[in-house]
């Protein structure tokens, strides 16, 4: 059976994911060592230890994301978090930085290592380098590959692959986002915050509500309509005589109908994005995908529960899997 890897931004969300049928959950510490460093999210060392014990009792794995790039001179925080993760009994750590991978392989050799999507390893040569050099057991694939490309990659590597199937769709080169950094001065890949709430402002301007990030207007909508969260790569801009979403529409990835094709392509695990989402969101999405993976394992047609209301803008896309926008 394909492993279902589900988000857990809080201890409550982790419990909800496990109860809904997650085979594995991924989470992070409450600091800049993970790429979802938002206020009110993530785990203390004590919370992680308790969460691991609870998940293991129900047969679920816990993966910890240490997937940001350490600042020069501040490596000790990331090193300490590796030790904390191992002490808590986690099943794997998800890493992106080469230096941190080397440190983990040297000082924590028994701690299973997964390669984060932040490392942007999207070809066999890159993946094999990480596997051979740092004994990486699984790679989380960037969201820029077609199903056919994933199948071709899997024929040339000897590690597990994990592919995103639902949630936020990052269209930047994974691990190299510069737009949010430019607007806010905080790097998603180093500080762990994309479009941080501390830099978001909603302001009434005449008949419109402007959604701003770092002083830049990203969206402008009538006051009586919902205003999207101002994420730069999904902003609405005017260029010449045209106004629209230059990089990507504010929609979410939903690749449930491609699960059989991803299984045939050799994908080991399916990943749901959304550590910043509520436990109710996590529970509903996990239940839907667990039903789909169970159906695939049993040779039944996949049930496609309605999840549109949980997607960004109530719209979904297959992203690069179907090569509709690349």
Image: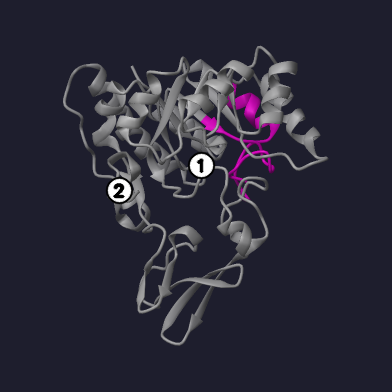
**Residue farthest toward the bottom in the current orientation of the protein:** 206
**Residue farthest toward the left in the current orientation of the protein:** 301
Question: Is 207 left, or right, of 93 in this rendering?
Answer: left
Q: In which quarter of the image is the N terminus?
A: top left
Q: What stretch is highlighted in magenta?
A: 26-53
Secondary structure under the numbered disc 2 in the rendered image: strand
The residue drawn where x is 47% and y is 33% is 122
Mark 1 residue crowding within 10 angstroms, few (<14) / some (14–19) / many (20+): many
Question: Is 188 left, or right, of 226 in this rendering?
Answer: right
Question: Is residue 251 found inside the magenta-colored segment of the image?
Answer: no
Q: Determine which residue is flagged by label 2.
A: 317
Tell me the CA gap for discs 2 and 1: 20 Å
Residue 55 position in % (x across, y down): 52, 22
Mark 2 residue crowding within 10 angstroms, few (<14) / some (14–19) / many (20+): some
Secondary structure under the numbered disc 1 in the rendered image: loop
Q: Does residue 267 appear anywhere in the picture?
A: yes
The quarter holding residue 48 reads top right
**Residue farthest toward the right in the current orientation of the protein:** 73
- Disc 2 or 1, which lies upstream in sequence? 1
Decide: is 251 above or below 267: below
**Residue farthest toward the front in the current orientation of the protein:** 125
- Magenta stretch, overall SS: loop
Residue 308 position in % (x across, y down): 28, 50
Q: Nearer the viewer, residue 319 or 257?
A: 319
The residue drawn where x is 43% and y is 24% is 161
Q: Determine which residue is flagged by label 1.
A: 275
Q: Does residue 268 appear anywhere in the picture?
A: no
């Amino acid at each position: 059976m394909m492993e279902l890897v589900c988000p857990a931004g809080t201890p409550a969300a982790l419990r909800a994911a496990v109860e809904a049928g997650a085979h594995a959950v991924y989470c992070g510490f409450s600091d800049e060592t993970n790429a979802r460093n938002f206020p009110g999210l993530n785990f203390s060392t004590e919370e992680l230890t308790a969460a691991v014990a609870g998940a293991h009792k129900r047969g679920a794995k816990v993966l910890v994301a240490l997937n940001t790039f350490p600042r020069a001179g501040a490596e000790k925080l990331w090193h300490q978090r590796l030790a904390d993760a191992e002490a808590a009994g986690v099943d794997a750590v998800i890493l992106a930085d080469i230096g941190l991978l080397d440190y983990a392989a040297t000082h924590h050799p028994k701690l299973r290592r997964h390669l984060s999507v932040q490392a942007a390893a999207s070809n066999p040569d890159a993946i094999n380098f990480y596997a051979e050099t740092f004994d990486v057991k699984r790679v989380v694939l960037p969201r820029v590959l077609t199903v056919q490309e994933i199948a071709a990659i899997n024929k040339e590597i000897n590690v597990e692959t994990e592919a995103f199937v639902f949630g936020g769709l990052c269209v930047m080169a994974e691990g190299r986002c510069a737009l949010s950094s430019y607007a806010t001065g905080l790097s998603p890949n180093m500080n762990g915050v994309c479009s941080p709430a501390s830099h978001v402002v909603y302001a009434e301007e005449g008949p419109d509500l402007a959604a701003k990030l770092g002083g830049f207007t990203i969206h402008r909508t009538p006051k009586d309509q919902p205003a999207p969260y101002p994420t730069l790569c999904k902003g609405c801009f005017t260029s010449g005589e045209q106004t629209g979403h230059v990089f990507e529409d504010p929609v979410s990835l939903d690749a449930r109908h491609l699960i059989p094709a991803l299984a045939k392509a050799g994908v080991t695990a399916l990943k749901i994005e959304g550590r910043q989402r509520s436990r109710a969101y996590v529970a509903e999405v996990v239940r839907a995908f667990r039903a789909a993976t169970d159906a695939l394992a049993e040779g039944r047609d996949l049930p496609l529960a309605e999840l549109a209301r949980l997607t960004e803008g109530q719209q979904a896309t297959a992203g690069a899997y179907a090569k509709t926008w690349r």
